[in-house]
Amino acid sequence: MNHNSKKNLMTGSKIIIESLIKEGVDTIFGYPGGAVLNIYDELFNYKDKIKHILVRHEQGAAHAADGYARASGKVGVVLVTSGPGATNTITGIATANMDSVPIVILTGQVPTNLIGNDAFQEADTVGITRPCTKHNYLVKDIKDLAKTIKEAFYIASTGRPGPVLIDIPKDITSSVYEFDYPETVELRGYSPTYFGHHVQISKLAAEILKAKRPLLYTGGGVISSNAANELKELAELLDLPVASTLMGLGGFPPDHPLFFGMLGMHGTYAANMAISNADFIVAIGARFDDRVTGKVEEFGKNAKFAHIDIDPSSIGKNVKIEIPVVGDVKSVLSSLLEILNNKTEEISSAKYDRLGWLEEINAWKYEHPLLYRMNDIIKPQYVIEKIYELTGGEAIIATEVGQNQMWTAQFYKFKNPRTLLTSGGLGTMGFGFPAAIGAQIACPDKTVFDIAGDGSIQMNIQELATAVQYNLPVKIAIINNNFLGMIRQWQELFYHKRYSFSEMNVNPDFVKLAEAYGAVGLRAKNPEEVVPVIEKALSIKKPVIMDFVVDKEENVYPIVAPGSPITGMLLV
Amino acid sequence: MEKTHILSILVENESGVLTRVAGLFSARGFNIDSICVAKTLEKNESKMIIATSGDTQILEQITKQLNRLVNVIKVQELTDEDSVVRQTVLIKVNADETTKSDIFRIKDIFGGRVIDVSRNSYTLEVTGSERKIESLIDILRPLGIKDIVKTGIIALQRTRRSS
């Protein structure tokens, strides 16, 4: 054998695609352009192996890949061109970064010799995306191409997941090199801690048993580490009440007697009161966001805190933590259960001591449940309740941001992990619809909804063409109040009803708009029409827009005024 | 509590690393007082010494975030007590017949060297702790400092003496 001859020679474009296949990628969300034409030309040869979804705006590609990743747990992949192609993905990348979603973004770049030359469609993509990615790369040598892709997928999907961007100059995609995909990665500065420290977990176990008023405060980490079963086992073993963040919904059975709903600014009365009266709070894959804590000095002010998180920089960031446990939620909870399972006697006495505490929380729950008042105008909460009932809680629900998002969190009971897709951290209007498209591609047999407002749906409405082109039966429910509803609500409550530029004086006719795209449009104007419209939408195997003309001035309650402690809730 | 902190950061020697590190400081409104970067003995490895001042809790957060960067291998906070800290200054000071001998005397006291001489100025090179450099500047200031340049501080952990 001649060891000097290079085998397996390929263009950079082919190396990219072969590497993606090695990573198990079968779907790409993208939009072609000059700098990625070589890659697109090669992609044309792989039509049977890789499905390319042509979006209508690059932001849509990033959100769709994000929705795909959230719904499936796999890495979402984006392919866009240089300059505007890359900058259009920024909001999508920042959204994924804030919510720890694994996506890999491949961006074209001008040829190496033109970088820094203000060339046509040139932008400093690695510079622009540095603060909003987990990591990013500019490939300057074709030798590094396969290794870089390997590392990108590894970094995106391990530890605290996140977006990784690879910027690839056009000349790299046309030059030729041997393809040899690395088996392993070697990264000296990157080794996430999966297994929690035994001493810390033992301490945690002891404190949980000792606490008289314990509470589990659960977040998105439960979902991303697939730890819902372990969480349920832990809660049931010790009768621990659970309150979830927005990102954690679906991580615990909603009808479970130990579940007290979402906490925070629009959380339930019971959850917020429980946090404030607990003596020991275990934060699990949550990050003490300001929308959760309210006035942070008052958050859990009677409690000691333990915090389980894979990202050490999340621990102790906003609140002092007595028992930090760095590690993967699933693995830490398993170790914790192992310790606790041997302590049968302590457990029964602990459970007995806590009966009063659970009664107290249940009293709060019955005192102030989530409520709304029906009248002859459609109430947004009613629409969401009916969507929940008619889908049996089994649908994947994407949301936009604002009132639609909060009502969804309150009134759709998420039974399963990875069924609520929502931009919790960045709060990106325009996220839901493309995310729903990505989720529908990941889960073709599932019913997928986007619950939207009339404002937010217009931020990425162009993706309706994508949904129609690929025959994706995504259902869009527009909670149409002709307002930026959450803005209006704040203006009503905190700005003396000065509705400064929050009214959507002109909206398109959403039914006609759907038809113009080749989708189906339905409208409900009074409460009796809500159920028939949802039923009809569910029976149609095409994208459907449902325009629900709702009460313009309905508010999301409870609400905690910004900067107030979360016990200071305004209730209906 | 505001306090001066010295961070020793071992990084992979790749383009963009300095920006990533500096970005973590600037994103939190933290000013970097000085920064020194150079290769270590290892291939593809550099060490940064960053001096900064600010709230201890925020700095702890920055340290954790630095550790999160893929190109950062190790972060260590060094203190005056457990490490040697040095800075070098080049200082061009007015000199005439009446002050030359003073300047030489000061140079000797501070263990420095004269590295450039002209008819009416001397340039001194002095290495020492930050405090030492500051007092040198105070002493020379009345003579008229024409120009000055300082390196950032560099620091190395002391070897622990076994008892």
Image (tube, coloured by chain):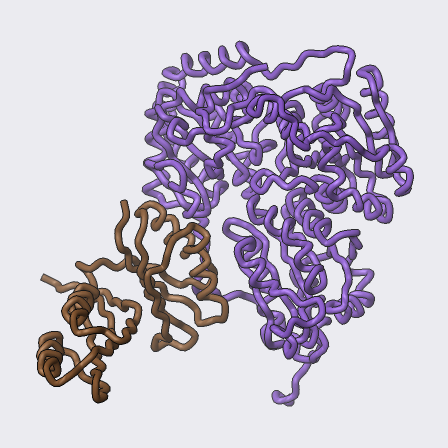
Where residue B157 sits in the image (x, y, percent)? Answer: 23, 65
Residue occupying the point 85% across, 21% down: A532
Viewer-closest of A93 and A364: A93
Specify the chain shown as brown.
B
Viewer-closest of A110 and A448: A110
Up the image or down, A473 lies above or below A13; here it is: above
Residue occupying the point 79% across, 38% down: A474
Label count reads 0
Up the image or down, A519 lies above or below B36; here it is: above
Where residue A198 sits in the image (x, y, percent)? Answer: 35, 43
Quadrant location, the C terminus of chain B: bottom left
Up the image or down, A443 lies above or below A449; here it is: below
Specify the chain shown as purple.
A
| Viewer can see residue A414 | no
Viewer-closest of A44 and A115: A115
Residue occupying the point 50% across, 31% down: A292
**Which quadrant of the figure has residue B76?**
bottom left
Residue occupying the point 13% across, 64% down: B161
Where residue A374 sits in the image (x, y, percent)? Answer: 72, 12
Viewer-closest of A343 and B55: B55
Where residue A72 sits in the image (x, y, percent)? Answer: 67, 45
A318 to the left or right of B160:
right
A291 to the left or right of A517:
left
A356 to the left or right of B96:
right
Quadrant location, the N terminus of chain B: top left
| Viewer can see residue B23 | yes
**Which quadrant of the figure has residue A339?**
top left
